[in-house]
Image: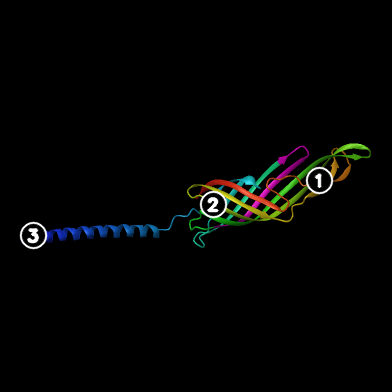
Amino acid sequence: MKTRLLFFYLLIITGSMAFAQEAEESAEAATEIAADSIPAKVKRLSLGVKLGVPNVAGGSAEVVLPFLDNRIAPYADFSGFDVEDAETEIALSYTEFGLNVYFGKEGKGLYAAIGAGNLSTDLTFYETFEEEGVTVQGKGTIGVDIASTNLKIGVKTGGRIYFRFELGYGFTSDVPSQLTVRLEEIGGDGVENEVFDFPAVPGVGDNGLLVGNIGFGISF
């Protein structure tokens, strides 16, 4: 009789422990499912700077839209800078507008991008030339706009402070190899047309633009 009671008690204890363990596992599973079902808070607006080519250094803005599971993000980049050497002054401004398409659902991580860029150049050349047998110094200014279609791949971190890295190429067919510039005598009225090679601009090649930069800023 005692043996049967002991066996009965052991059976009850074992069953209770098994039931308790199963209930605990079910509760943990339910907690994980509930956590997964809560959508992650997406930071919609990012403001920061980018350093690289062809922008050198400038501002950047991005807005993650609530479409396609937060994968679409329009962006805008802008910058202005000057480059000088002994014979040429180059005033540059760069703008780019486009879309980042994220592979994840939280507006961060790996993404592909397509954008329309415009590199505006104001070039000032200095050259000496002969005017009625006299050597004079001339100055000429010309503006050249280089439009490009940019394809990039990038990655962006999450959090309030973000970092990003981008690499790509800008396709364009309007990068001149030479420029004919009207030189005017400094302090006089002499005029001369002179042909100059297109100066070296960071990231600009004969048929396109190298696009590469690192960026950082704040997300809201």
Q: Which mark is residue 196?
A: 1
Left or right of residue 7, residue 218 in this image: right
Which residue is drawn at the image coordinates 33% and 57% (left, top)? 31
How dense is the environment of label 1, judged by Cα within 10 Å: few (below 14), some, or many (20 and up)? few
The amino acid type of the residue labelled 3 equals Thr
Gap in Å between the C-alphas at discs 2 and 3? 69 Å
Q: Say whether disc 2 or disc 3 marks the residue closer to the N-terminus.
A: 3
Q: Is residue 100 magenta?
A: yes
Q: Which mark is residue 3?
A: 3
Which residue is drawn at the image coordinates 70% and 53% (left, top)? 208
The amino acid type of the residue labelled 1 equals Phe
Dot 2 falls on a residue whose secondary structure is: strand
Task: Please identify the quarter of the rendering in which residue 24 is found.
Answer: bottom left
How dense is the environment of label 2, judged by Cα within 10 Å: few (below 14), some, or many (20 and up)? some
Which residue is drawn at the image coordinates 54% and 46% (left, top)? 217
Task: Please identify the quarter of the rendering in which residue 174 is found.
Answer: bottom right
32 or 144, which is in the foreground?
32
Left or right of residue 157, residue 29 in this image: left
